[in-house]
């Protein structure tokens, strides 16, 4: 089992930056990739980005590409999502997830473990 805990959400203004962190514990060795998703009421959970735990290669959805960076810290077993130039449409609950079998997962079904989510609200 892997446990994930997100932190760093909050209320920011458009144009601001925000850093979300995800702390992983448990069977870290079973993780192939870590990802970030977001969800707004009435909509499906949306892929934001992911990082290969082994290689560090990152993947982003087009809407955040160029203004977001995902990184990992082996020593702390954490993954960070840095988002810049935030927009009101970035408002959502952000979830951290871990995948055991895929190195570049972008689909909800490819992830095995999920955090509880953290709210990000961007005001205009």
Image (cartoon, grey):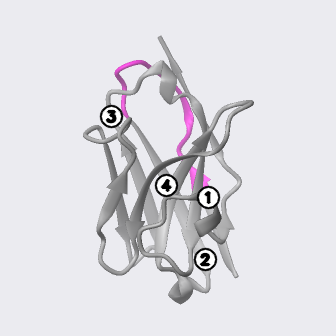
Judge from the rendering whether residue 64 lies leftward or rightward of residue 105; answer left or right. left
Rounded to the nearest angstrom, the CA distance separating label 1 from label 2 is: 20 Å
Rounded to the nearest angstrom, the CA distance separating label 3 from label 4 is: 15 Å
Q: Residue at x 56, y 73 (%)?
A: 99
Residue 30 to residue 69: above or below: below
Quadrant housing residue 53? bottom left
Q: Which residues are magenta?
A: 6-17
Give the secondary structure at mark 1.
helix
Of callouts 1 and 3, the N-terminal one: 3
Rounded to the nearest angstrom, the CA distance separating label 4 from label 1 is: 19 Å
Of callouts 1 and 2, the N-terminal one: 2
User: Which residue was labeled with disc 3?
Assistant: 84
Residue furthest right as drawn: 42
User: Which residue was labeled with disc 4?
Assistant: 21
Give the secondary structure at mark 2.
strand
Residue 30 is covered by the magenta coloring: no
- Give the mark toward the camera: 1 or 3: 1
Judge from the rendering whether residue 63 lies leftward or rightward of residue 119; answer left or right. left
Q: Which mark is residue 108?
A: 1
């Amino acid at each position: 089992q892997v446990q994930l805990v997100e932190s760093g959400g909050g209320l920011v203004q458009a144009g601001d930056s925000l850093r979300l962190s995800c702390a992983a514990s448990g069977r870290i060795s079973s993780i192939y990739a870590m990802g970030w998703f977001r969800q707004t009421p009435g909509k499906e959970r949306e892929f934001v980005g992911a990082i290969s735990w082994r290689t560090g290669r990152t993947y982003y959805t087009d809407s955040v590409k160029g203004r977001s960076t995902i990184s990992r810290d082996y020593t702390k077993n954490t993954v960070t999502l840095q988002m810049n130039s935030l927009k009101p449409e970035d408002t959502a609950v952000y979830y951290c997830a871990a995948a055991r079998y895929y190195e570049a997962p972008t689909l909800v079904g490819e992830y095995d473990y999920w955090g509880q989510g953290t709210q990000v609200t961007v005001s205009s």
